[in-house]
Amino acid sequence: MRDKLRALQAPSRAVWIDTARGLGIVLVVYGHVLRGQFHSGLIGWTPAIALQDRAIYAFHMPFFFLLSGLFAGARVRSRGEFIRRRLVTIVYPYVLWSVIQILLTMGAGHLANEHHALADLARIGTDPIGQFWFLYVLAMLQLLLLLPRTLFLLTIPIGVAIFLLYGNGPLLPRAAWYLPFFAVGVVLGRSGLEAALPTWRRAIAWLVGGAVAFAGLFALMPLLNGVPAALAQYALAGAGIVAALGLARLLDSRIALLSALGTASLAIFVLHVICGAAIRVGLERLGVSQPAIAIMLVTAGGLLIPFVIYRVAVSLDITPWLGLGYAPRARDPVPPSVEAAHVPLEPAAPNADVGRDKARGPAFQ
């Protein structure tokens, strides 16, 4: 069994894409820390905190869905392998860490910001808790990859229509909101994104252009409502994503810790709430009440403790068993110029049965 799991290791990727994941997970943890500190009564919801919260939540989760899509359409040998990958990287982590977080929250009693009962364990199949909605929605979107490619592409306008009608609320409209970002990642693929940002000049253009557009749309959003506001949300998130990708490409491997955090993004995601809450309670017991110091320490702990756990699990070759995904593969030493090109959604061969197009494996069968 261990040999089978090792054979299904995570696909290799460029360092700067790991840096992008690192940026994304830092935003996730920091955003959750701000809200956690507020709900604990440790900070007030000041204009500065509200501004940071709005800016982060405007694009950081669409950013993660796009990054998830980059590798979701990678070739696999069979439907069985496709399903096994999703079980190991999405379903099992979702179930395992949802159960652990519920039990720990129950044990923490009044010290926890969220309160759960044993009955919540029975509902995780339809009602995800806390941050785990992301894994639930990601599983929903990945199932769409089993559709023929034409039908997959047709789900995108349907998703946008559902979001425009119902907003970003329950699970289905929420999945509909994130579907276009996930689909862009699938269509681009890793090689497509790398080809879009080949030079530092292009990266600077993305960073500056995306940041300027994001700032303008961010200022405009309070003036909009209805369908224009909903469409502007897509543009706002897109601008933030473009700026973040440009920054990640510029940073590349210059901040080794950031790219390292990117390789451990799943582990940090499932563990950061538990670790951050433990540090917050510890700081309260120690009498550390200065908000800036508490936010910095809780954020650092929410990132670094899961990262250390992940690295230990990698060294012991037990990451899949702990619900932390596959260990990263060594990066491909072949220069990008001679690397096999990613051909997203290539046309089927003449007279091919589109429903059984073998070119992309089960992702578009």
Image (cartoon, helix red, strand yellow):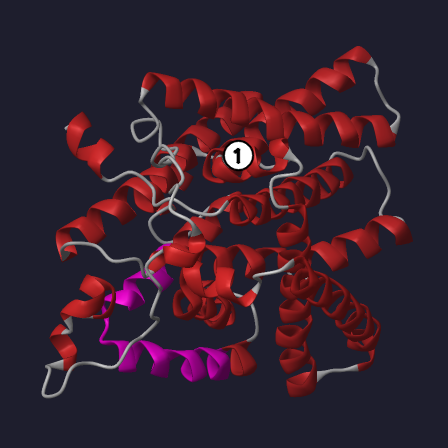
In percent of width and height, residue 89 lies at: 34, 42
For disc 1, the marked residue is 268
Q: Is residue 254 above or below residue 165?
A: above
Dividing the picture into quarters, in which one does residue 41 lie?
top right
Residue 275 lies left or right of residue 138; in this view the side is right
Please provide percent x and percent y for residue 363.
25, 64
Q: In the visual, does 308 lie left or right of 249?
A: left
Looking at the picture, tell me which residue is in the foreground, 121 or 6. 6
The magenta segment is: 139-162
Task: State the residue at coordinates (21%, 36%).
Answer: 7
Q: Residue 286: image x %, image y %? A: 79, 11
- At which x and y percent is residue 49? 84, 48
Magenta segment includes 4 = no
Give the left or right position of residue 284, taking residue 194 as reference: right
Q: Residue at x 53, y 34 (%)?
A: 268
Rendered view: 111 above or below 161: above
The answer to whether residue 158 is magenta is yes
Quick check: 302 above or below 249? above
